[in-house]
Image (spheres, grey):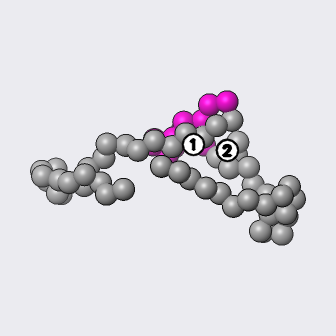
Amino acid sequence: MVVAAGCTGQGEGAGGGNDEDLLRNYDWTQMPGTTVRNDILQVSALDRRIVEQDSSGGQPNPR
């Protein structure tokens, strides 16, 4: 999986120069499958399934 972010020069944010550092200013522990280590954000696929309301059956989560 590849995640891309918008690329602008320093101080050239699309929001009128209000750049946001999502790596450092976001609590990635709240998003399953993400790990931040040494300023690198790793996003991994999880083995989640879509199941019936009674937890029976199910199918792999489409990616």
* Numbered disc 2: secondary structure: loop
Does the stretch in magenta take in 32? yes
Mark with earlier residue (2, 1) = 2
Question: Which residue is the site of mark 1?
Answer: 28
Residue 58 is situated, as x and y percent measured from the top left of the image, at 17, 53
Residue 62 is situated, as x and y percent measured from the top left of the image, at 31, 57
Residue 18 in sight from this viewpoint? no
Residue 50 is situated, as x and y percent measured from the top left of the image, at 25, 55
Q: Which residues are magenta?
A: 27-38
**Which mark, residue 7?**
none
In the image, 47 versus 18, the foreground residue is 47
Question: Which residue is the site of mark 2?
Answer: 23
Q: Amino acid at mark 1?
A: Trp
Q: Quadrant of residue 35?
A: top right
Question: Taking 51 as reference, is 56 left or right?
Answer: left
Question: Taking 28 as reference, is 63 left or right?
Answer: left
Q: Amino acid at mark 2?
A: Leu
Depicted 13 relative to depicted 41: above or below: below
Residue sitting at 84 percent across and 58 percent down?
9
Q: Estimate the spatial distance between the alpha carbons at disc 2 and disc 1, rounded to whole Å.
A: 8 Å
* Numbered disc 1: secondary structure: helix
Does the stretch in magenta take in 56? no
Category of crowding for the residue at label 2, using alpha-carbon neighbours closer than 10 angstroms: few (below 14), some (14–19), many (at least 20) = few
Question: Taking 60 as reference, is 54 left or right?
Answer: left
Residue sitting at 55 percent across and 39 percent down?
42
Residue 60 is situated, as x and y percent measured from the top left of the image, at 25, 52
Q: Nearer the viewer, mark 2 or mark 1?
A: 2
Residue sitting at 62 percent across and 31 percent down?
37
